[in-house]
Image (cartoon, helix red, strand yellow):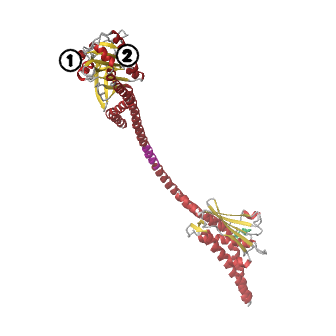
């Protein structure tokens, strides 16, 4: 599918380059070549014009010389002839003309500047030349031709020689044209000069001399023959094809070679057209190189576009794949999360029942202690009751009252134990959730306040910075803290300046509440047992030995830990480590 698209683009590119761009490119470079030759073209044309203009006024001037009239009146005077020949030679040298010569009315040359040469015109007849008969008939003649005597091409002027009333002869001047061609050749240009009939009179290529770039009609050939202008055996058509290009520029194919030709307007008297030829091949090559460059660029653009398209398609595919994987993974994760949640739920249920079972087993452990705990006061109650009865029988009501009061105190104590046990055994009603530790501690201090005041205990409390939220139950946690404070105060009983330190500190995912006292610390053997129910070192009536045990279980219910140890600087420190509530929230979210 994609390859098909690229193919179509390449075909379009080829068609556009071939049919739209190529003709324009080719034309551009061909015209550029013509442009480069414009200067050569102008110099050549101007040079020819200047020569024609320079020589034109000279023949009438020379014709005015009196010795010429003298000679024409006495054509056979040898002395006059000799003087005349010498004079014309001098003139010819002075004006750089190739030949200057004098003809009588029949067209015979009497004297000539080339009288010393083998190709001397003296004695030759030129009555067939337009410069001769036009000068006689119209007072002025001009012509260009190949010299019949010299074989050299030249431009001729003829002016009548008169004695004031009658025309006696014609003075002619010829200048050669080959010097121009040499100049052009030296400049490295191909130039042709054609006459009005399309015959090449001058050319940087000698083999083109007298060849026609247009059709040679019989009339043309007849005229050439009549004036003996060109050697007829050399006059023939040149294989030329022309195609217009732009303005003065044409595309000319001469004997198979293509040229960009720039032609001048015809040079007035002579009817000459100067045409500069530049080979078209280099311009074509330049155009082709440019086309090739464009083709390469176009192809590169097409391929780059195709590449980008395929890459973005690849990326699309990759993205879709990634999205699919993410979706799959997400659902996997969701599944995992659900499984984990279920597992946690299961664990929590197990934990709860374990905790409950743990409590029951603790209760079982307690029964031994309990029976002792209850049997002793019960035995005491029994004896106090018997005593009271005996005292009443003896009429001693005061003693009887004393015994009854002891019974009352005993029952108070037993009620307290039973209350604690009830609390302990009961499943917690209070829900576990985030509690503000600051509030809990404030309230615990308020509850313990009477006790603290009575013992004159100073409390150093560093409230938590900001909201310290931990997982627990408000009331039960408060109960734990009150218990720790009470134990601390108990430990410092009888001290002069008792003081406790309460602190709340965060630690990796937990909050830690510590209560530190300056008492004697915990005895070595006590540390192992202090969390056991009914373990106490306090004297009877002061402690039940249930505070730490119950607190331990409460904190465990919260998912935290209760610990106690001796502080290195003396006294005991008890701590409650609780799970930080935001951490819980985060964990649940994950
Ligand atoms: P009770 O306070 O009724 O004795 P607890 O379970 O609260 O029962 O404490 C058990 C024992 O742990 C105490 O009797 C005491 O020996 C020890 N203990 C508790 N807190 C402290 C403390 N702050 N300093 C020293 N010992 C302590």
How many C-alpha atoms fall within 10 Å of the one at disc 2: few (<14), some, or many (≥20)?
some
Residue 314 circle label = none
Instruction: Report the residue that reaches farthest toward the left.
Output: 219
Image quadrant for the N terminus?
Answer: top left
Element type at marker 1? helix
Query: 502 or 264: which is nearer to us?
Result: 264
Element type at marker 2? helix
The magenta stretch spans residue 439: no
Query: 237 or 46: which is nearer to us?
Result: 46
Residue 441 higher or lower than 337, as above or below: below
Mark 2 vs mark 1, CA separation in Å: 43 Å
User: Is residue 190 among what the camera can see?
Assistant: yes
Position of residue 563 measured from the top left corner of the image (x, y, whole percent):
68, 63
Position of residue 518 measured from the top left corner of the image (x, y, whole percent):
76, 69
From the viewer's perspective, tell me whether residue 583 is left or right of residue 79. Answer: right
Q: Quadrant of ligand 1?
A: bottom right
Residue 218 circle label = 1
Residue 87 circle label = 2
User: Magenta residues?
Assistant: 315-326
Tell me which residue sits at (72%, 63%) in the image. Answer: 565
Tell me which residue sits at (32%, 16%) in the image. Answer: 101
The magenta stretch spans residue 319: yes
Q: Indicate the quadrant where residue 405 lies.
A: bottom right
How many C-alpha atoms fall within 10 Å of the one at disc 1: few (<14), some, or many (≥20)?
few
Position of residue 318 measured from the top left corner of the image (x, y, whole percent):
45, 44
């Amino acid at each position: 599918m994609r390859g098909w698209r690229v193919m179509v683009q390449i075909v379009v590119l080829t068609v556009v380059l071939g049919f739209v761009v190529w003709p324009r490119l080719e034309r551009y470079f061909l015209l550029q070549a013509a442009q480069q030759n414009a200067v050569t073209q102008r110099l050549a044309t101007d040079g020819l014009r200047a020569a024609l203009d320079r020589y034109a006024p000279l023949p009438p001037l020379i014709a005015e010389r009196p010795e010429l009239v003298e000679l024409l009146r006495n054509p056979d005077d040898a002395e006059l002839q000799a003087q005349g020949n010498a004079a014309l030679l001098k003139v010819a040298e002075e004006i750089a003309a190739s030949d200057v010569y004098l003809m009588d009315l029949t067209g015979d040359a009497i004297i000539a500047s080339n009288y010393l040469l083998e190709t001397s015109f003296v004695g030759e007849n030129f009555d067939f030349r337009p410069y001769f008969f036009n000068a006689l008939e119209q007072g002025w003649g001009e012509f260009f031709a190949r010299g019949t005597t010299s074989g050299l091409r030249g431009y001729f002027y003829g002016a009548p020689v008169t004695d004031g009333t009658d025309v006696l002869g014609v003075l002619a001047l010829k200048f050669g044209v080959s010097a121009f061609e040499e100049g052009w050749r030296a400049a490295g240009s191909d130039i042709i000069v054609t006459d009005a009939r399309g015959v090449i009179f001058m050319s940087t290529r000698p083999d083109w001399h007298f060849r026609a770039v247009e059709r040679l009609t019989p009339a043309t050939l007849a005229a050439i023959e009549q004036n003996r202008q060109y050697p007829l055996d050399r006059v023939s058509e040149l294989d030329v094809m022309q195609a217009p290009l732009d303005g003065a520029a044409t595309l000319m194919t001469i004997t198979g070679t293509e040229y960009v030709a720039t032609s001048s307007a015809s040079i007035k008297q002579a009817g000459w057209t100067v045409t500069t030829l530049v080979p078209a091949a280099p311009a074509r090559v330049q155009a082709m190189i440019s086309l090739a460059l464009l083709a390469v660029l176009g192809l590169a653009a097409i391929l780059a576009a195709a590449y980008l398209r395929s890459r973005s398609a690849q990326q699309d595919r990759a993205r879709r794949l990634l999205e699919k994987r993410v979706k799959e993974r997400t659902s996997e994760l969701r599944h995992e999360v659900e499984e984990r949640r279920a597992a946690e739920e299961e664990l929590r249920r197990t934990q709860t029942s374990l905790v409950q079972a743990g409590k029951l087993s603790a209760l079982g452990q307690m029964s031994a202690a309990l029976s002792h705990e209850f049997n002793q006061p019960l035995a005491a109650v029994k004896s106090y009751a018997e005593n009271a009865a005996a005292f009443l029988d003896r009429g001693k009501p005061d003693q009887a009252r004393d015994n009854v009061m002891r019974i009352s105190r005993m029952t108070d104590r037993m009620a307290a134990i039973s209350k604690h046990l009830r609390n302990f055994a009961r499943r917690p009603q209070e829900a576990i959730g985030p509690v503000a530790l600051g509030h809990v501690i404030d309230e615990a201090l308020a509850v313990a306040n009477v006790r603290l005041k009575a013992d004159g205990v100073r409390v150093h409390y560093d409230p938590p910075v900001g909201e310290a939220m931990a997982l627990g139950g408000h009331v039960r946690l408060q109960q734990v803290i009150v218990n720790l404070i009470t134990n601390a105060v108990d430990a410092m009983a009888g001290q002069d300046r008792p003081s406790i330190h309460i602190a709340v500190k965060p630690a990796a995912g937990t909050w830690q509440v510590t209560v530190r006292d300056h008492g004697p610390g915990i005895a070595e053997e006590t540390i192992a047992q202090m969390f056991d129910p009914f373990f106490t070192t306090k004297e009877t009536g002061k402690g039940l030995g249930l505070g730490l045990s119950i607190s331990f279980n409460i904190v465990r219910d919260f998912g935290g830990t209760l610990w106690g140890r001796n502080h290195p600087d003396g006294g005991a420190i008890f701590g409650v480590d609780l799970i930080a509530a935001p951490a819980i929230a985060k964990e649940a979210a994950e």
